[in-house]
Amino acid sequence: MAIKKVIEHPAKVLSTPCAEVTEINEEIIALLDDLYDTMVEYDGVGIAAPQINVGLRVAIVELGEERDILEMINPTVIKTDGAEVDIEGCLSFPGLYGEVERPDYVKIEACDREGRVYELEAGGFEARAILHEIDHLDGILFDSKIKRIVTEEELEEMYAEEEE
């Protein structure tokens, strides 16, 4: 559909809890498509509606090796378990990376673009990405959860070591 501008911190829309979607209509379907196009353009693995200046509980996350797209409308967290510290970044905080502790497992309930309610369980990186995007919908930003800032040099070193 369209590539939108990613809203950057400290824009108020990012720290404001989003409104529930009351009807899945053409506007919501177009929003999901815009989120996808924008995420791909900005090379993200997930994006939430407030990041393109829309205060609705809609987000997407790229899952798995096949790069399937998880569309979440009005997601709620049913259960979490475990804890893991890993490095995160955010499209709304360009150049900022940090160690963030999140649950290692999540079970959510949400709606898809057809209005069907589904439950999904995820672990590891996928759980982290889902929880990061749901935090956006609740007005919670990842910088408030950073335990230690990671420099771009440290990131480059980590990626170089992984490739070896």
Image (tube, helix red, strand yellow):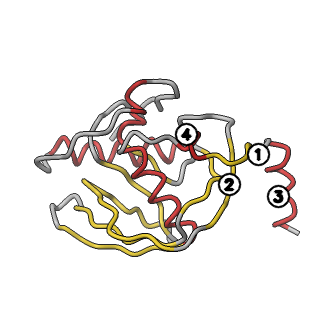
Q: Which amino acid type is marked by label 3?
A: Met
- Crowding around mark 2 (Cα neighbors within 10 Å: few <14, some 14 to 19, many 20+) is some
Q: Residues within 10 Å of mark 4 (few under 14, many from 20)?
A: some
Residue type indicated by callout 2: Ile
Distance (Cα) linking label 4 and label 2: 14 Å
Circles 3 and 2 in contact, beta carbons < 8 Å: yes
- Inter-mark Cα distance, 4 to 3: 20 Å
Give SS at disc 2. Answer: strand
Position of 89 with respect to 115 (left or right) is right
Disc marking residue 158:
3
Contact between labelled residues 3 and 4, with CB atoms less than 8 Å apart:
no
Asked if labels 1 and 4 touch by Cβ distance under 8 angstroms, the answer is no
Q: Do callouts 1 and 2 mark residues in contact (Cβ within 8 Å)?
A: yes
Q: In the figure, 74 relative to 84: above or below? A: above
Neighbour tally class for label 1: few under 14, some 14-19, many 20 plus, Cα within 10 Å: some
Which quarter shows the C terminus?
A: bottom right
Instruction: Decide which of 38, 83 is in the foreground and name it.
Output: 83
* Badge 4 or badge 3: first in the primary sequence: 4
> Dot 4 corresponds to which residue?
91
How far, Cα to Cα, is label 3 from label 1? 11 Å
> In what element is the residue under mark 3?
helix
Q: Residue at x 51, y 24 (%)?
A: 10
**Residue beneath the point at 11% across and 48% down:** 23
Question: Mark 1 belongs to which amino acid?
Answer: Val
Q: Quadrant of the N terminus?
A: top left
Amino acid marked by disc 4: Leu
Q: Position of residue 162 (x, y in %)?
A: 82, 66
Of callouts 4 and 1, the N-terminal one: 4
